Image (tube, rainbow, N blue to C red):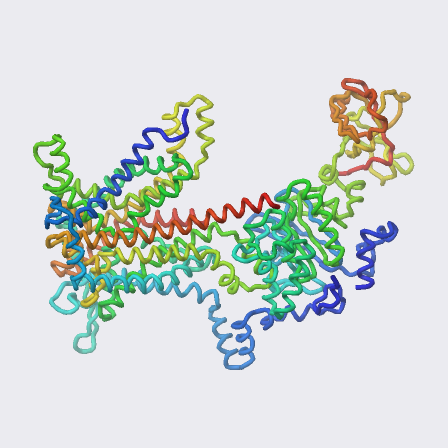
Amino acid sequence: MKFGLSWFNIASLALGFLFLYLPIGLLIIYSFNESRLVTVWAGFSTKWYGEMLHNEGLLNAAWVTLRVAFTASCFATVLGTVAGVVMSRFGAFSGRTLFSGMIYAPLVMPEVITGLSLLLMFVAVALDRGFVTVTIAHITFSMCYVAVVVQSRLHTFDRSIEEAAMDLGCPPARTFFQITLPIIAPAVVAGWLLSFTLSLDDLVIASFTTGPGATTLPMKIYSQVRLGVTPEINAVCTVLVGVVAAGVLAASLITRRQEMRRETEERMAATTA
Amino acid sequence: MAPQRQPADPADPRHETRVAFVSGSTASAGPLAGLHARLLMVPPYKMLADLLRRLGFSGRTAVIAVPYLWLLAFFLAPFLIVLKISVAEVQIAMPPYTPLVSFVEDGWIAFHATLGNYTFLLDDPLYLDSYLSSLKIALVSTLLALAVGYPIAYGMVKAPRRWRFALLMMVILPFWTSFLIRVYAWIGILKKEGLLNLALMNLGLLDQPLTILNTDTAVYIGIVYSYLPFMVLPLYANLEKMDLSLLEAAADLGCRPIKAFWVITVPLSIPGIIAGCFLVFIPAVGEFVIPDLLGGSETLMIGKTLWSEFFNNRDWPLSSAVAVLLLLVLVIPIVLFQRMQERNAQA
Amino acid sequence: MSEAGTLGGAARSGSSAARQRWAPWNDPNEKPHVQIVGVTKRFDDFVAVDNVSLDIYKREFFSLLGPSGCGKTTLLRMLAGFETPSEGQILLEGEDMSGVPPYRRPVNMMFQSYALFPHMSVEKNIAFGLKQDGVPKPEIERRVAEVIEMVQLGRFAKRKPHQLSGGQRQRVALARSLVKKPKMLLLDEPLGALDKNLRTQTQFELMNIQEETGITFVIVTHDQEEAMTVSSRIAVMDHGRIVQVSTPGELYEYPNSRYVAEFIGEVNVLEGRVAEREGDHLLVQSPEAGCAIETGPSGDEPQGRQVWIAVRPEKLVISKEPPPPGTRNCMTGEVWDIGYLGNLSIYHVKLDSGKMITATQANMARLIERPITWEERVYLTWAPSAAVVLLN
């Protein structure tokens, strides 16, 4: 009986990843298509990238999206980390069930509901829709993802380290900032990246909560998709995919190298004891 | 080592322990707390601090309050507003609905609320069908996602350790790229002159192009594709923790591998299955982008309905009612999901 | 330092007379350093610590000994301030510690998992406690260097915890908890993660450090050998209660119950009933032992009372010669198993009653021919005062 990979395993992995990456791959290939048609290959050309760079509407939308994503991620990370700490360390307090419900529900809530409800609230308090409202909306759902990431990291955190700090004279608040936070920093950073991606990617909630002058890139792409596409869209998509992929790969390579260096050091320490 | 030179000499019988225990001892408490301790000697500050403490405010409460208040204001309160507007009537005004409370002559307050939207929804078969259809499509997609995702997760767990990290990255990477883009890519593949038909016809497997785009099938493919990482990751996390020696024990006792899979592996992976299904099913019910881009006009999904009621018909009260009903339909799964997460977090 | 130092020093090295004299728990003029008064700790329905009262004196190396779940770690954590007693008080030098959080107690703890700060170097780890107290920088550096010398980690000062081996990490943890010169040092199973050789070596190092610094040590362990080696006194715990508090010698030779007798070292327990009182000792009938048992001097017990006689293996004399018939304190059986340890031999003897007895004997003669061998009939005798009468 083999416990390694069977043919079935290899096939399912291969087909699975093919399924995941084929559409993206085709998208990238056809961004270099000479002709206007998205499906008939007419030769290699980078003209759509040129067109994309001249499309002011598109570039403005991209800039807005980046600003919203950055601002929202920073706030969401702070709020989400606090929420994660509360969920993980504060034990029982009155109103905890509601709090935990409000943290987990947005993770699965259909976006149309969150978007609609936030818009209606903004209208009810007569808040003009635009950059601020979109950002508030993004902060609200992103912070829940950050909270979950931070909470799960704290779950596996060795509490005796915090106890040791307190035993040595460090009050709880200072312990958090000097000891806990530096150690869970990677999880907090991961939370930031997650918020950034979610914000960058969001169409539905942005459509509900944004206003004139704050059109986001996904909204722009969506409207163009409905109207009729040129490979310019493919070009935009390729650039986005490329940037994100590069970022993710870089991050994972760095983490990997750090981990491997750490493992080597641990092994060396064990032998030279 | 001569302890007697140090001020805090434990061997010195005259050492006063009292000093260290004074609450607010500035030396050991850090700059902010030290400032607080010194300010406490100023009467007005002290009175304010005592009052706040009596009202139940402490450092701890403040920390809980910050995210709590935000979520109350921007997550919970909006739902209450949706509820309020769902009992209003549409009118040509800004905002386009009747107010709940208005002042009429003689200083009387008039309440204006109607269940008209709800009765409209429940009478019109379109909406009922939309809800049912959404549930059906979400359920079928979830099961398909499970069928596709489980072998992938299982393969990842069986793969040699050195590959695991790379495989994990490869599953996550699409998630980090734009959702919209990935759905859009499928348009190009599934349409009549699309790449799928092109490939199948060139291979001689088809004479006529298949109509997949703008049907329910395209929606299934789209949902499975977009939500696949949400199914694979919890499954992988669960399967990874499984003890392989259980399978070895089964083999030792004469159990064939296929049977061991169904009798041991699958039951142990049920928590992962459930988590994955929740993460796919609940949002899929209210999904908008996928049915809009990939589905046809006969594809009824409640997310699409809500969107068009809001943006095309500008009927805010009706959309609110749609949202409220959708929330009611989903509240049980959402509560179950939250309970499950809490329980896992406490474990 | 003078008097205190010599007392502490004399407790271990120096004249044996002085060593035996050092027993502050027997001195009515000595006031205890730590007093645990009627402390109970409940977690929901579960009672972890049940009405425990204990006095620990200055400069003791005190052990809390017991199996897992007996409440010793909970008691230690209450001393540190990480748990608050549900009932009772803890007094440190007469000061009530209720409401004093761990970061304000002059007590430091060495954790079982060492709990080193992974993002700080060895030096920074050790300096951490001093920084919290606002000690000026040059003094911090001096004290840290001092204590690094004491635990012999000079070469590793700049390394981070993951670059150290288990034994080195343990020293860092120890140094970190010592540098603040606490009144009391709490150690939670400090030697559990070390292998046997390192453990023995570290035991003696700990004793030396305790002697030099004069700090009161309270250690939690489930390893009775460890407790016996290092302690001035041991508290044996069972299900949240203290069963006996004594010096290692007293615990070994005068256990107060079967629990303690069986927990510490090897012992043979013979069940019997009081037949009659003879002068200052008792006569006990024991079908298990297959003979009448004469005890050492003991109190008066009613006839027919169930008692247990505890005899340590090394107190049994094993012989192939049958003693005169009617001899008391004489058991007979067949040798079931022999363990040869070089310096001594362990004999497992199955009595006629079926009970297994363990007897050890030093190998006085060179191994030319084994005097006693398997399945031989042997006779085990012991002096009446070599056994203890246990009432529970």
Camera-side residue of B93 and C368: C368
Q: The N terminus of chain B lies in which quarter of the figure? A: bottom right
**Vertical placement of residue A265 versus C180, above or below:** above
**Relative image position of residue C192 (x, y in whole percent):** 63, 44
Please identify the quarter of the rendering in which residue A49 is found: bottom left
- Position of residue B164 in the picture relative to residue B318 (left or right): right
Q: Judge whether residue B131 can be spotted in this image.
A: no
Outermost bottom residue: B43
Please identify the quarter of the rendering in which residue B316 is found: bottom left
Camera-side residue of B195 and C36: B195
**Vertical placement of residue C310 versus B113, above or below:** above
**Vertical placement of residue C314 versus C31, above or below:** above
- Position of residue B19 in the picture relative to residue B301 (left or right): right
**Vertical placement of residue A140 versus C167, above or below:** below
Give the residue drawn at x 47%, y 31%.
B245
- Position of residue A100 in the picture relative to residue B174 (left or right): right
**Relative image position of residue C159 (x, y in whole percent):** 57, 54
Please identify the quarter of the rendering in which residue A218 is found: bottom left
**Relative image position of residue B254 (x, y in whole percent):** 44, 21
Camera-side residue of C202 and B37: C202
